[in-house]
Amino acid sequence: MDGLQLHLLTNHLPIIGTMAALLVVILGMLRKNDGAITAGLITYVLMAVAVVPAYLSGEEAEERVEEIAGVSHDVIHEHEEMAELSLWLTSLSGLLALGALFTRSKQSALAPKVAIAFVVLAVIAFGQAARTGHVGGKI
């Protein structure tokens, strides 16, 4: 399997997976269901890790498609720039998810605030990742 195939295989998982995990966390918070919150946070951390192979395989994918007639170098560049921001936002929200898990396990008074901060950043990260995927689809 080459980088292009790996990129096409892995790029949807972090977008869909983080969205699903985030929804589980939000529903868990609304219903005050600790199990759902924990499951959503753990899943989010795993999906945040999954963004790394999607991002890293992008460079080889770029090399494979940039010489194809009709492929816009400007769109590739835009996608690449957006992907870097998506990587950072998703990674930071994954770290916040870990922080939320930790503060919850310690029954810290900060736990609700860390969870809210996670939700806010994760929503922003998802929006950026969705935009990145949309631009990537134009390639």
Image (cartoon, grey):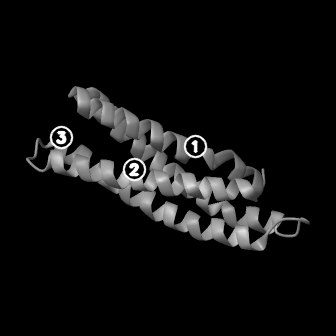
Q: What's the CA distance linking mark 1 and mark 2? A: 16 Å
Residue 137 x/y as whole percent? 71, 53
Q: Which residue is mark 1?
A: 13
Residue 111 image offset from top left, x and y in percent: 16, 46
Front-lying residue, 27 or 92? 27
For badge 3, the amino acid type reads Ser
- Numbered disc in front, either 1 or 2: 2
Instruction: Tell me the residue at 87%/69% (across/down).
Output: 67
Q: Is residue 68 left or right of residue 113?
A: right
| First reached walking from the N terminus: tag 1 or tag 2 | 1
**Mark 2 residue element:** helix
Disc 3 + disc 1, Cβ < 8 Å = no
Q: Residue 125: where, in percent of width, then height? A: 44, 55
Of residues 108 and 134, the one drawn nearer to the viewer in this rendering:
134
The answer to whether residue 97 is seen in the rendering is no
Residue underneath mark 2: 123
What amino acid is at disc 1? Leu
Label 3 or label 1, whichever lies nearer to me, is 1
Q: Which residue is mark 3?
A: 105
Residue drawn 78% across the image and 50% down it:
1
Indicate which label's residue lies in the foreground, 2 or 3: 2
The quadrant in which residue 35 appears is top left
Nearer to the camera, 94 or 105:
94
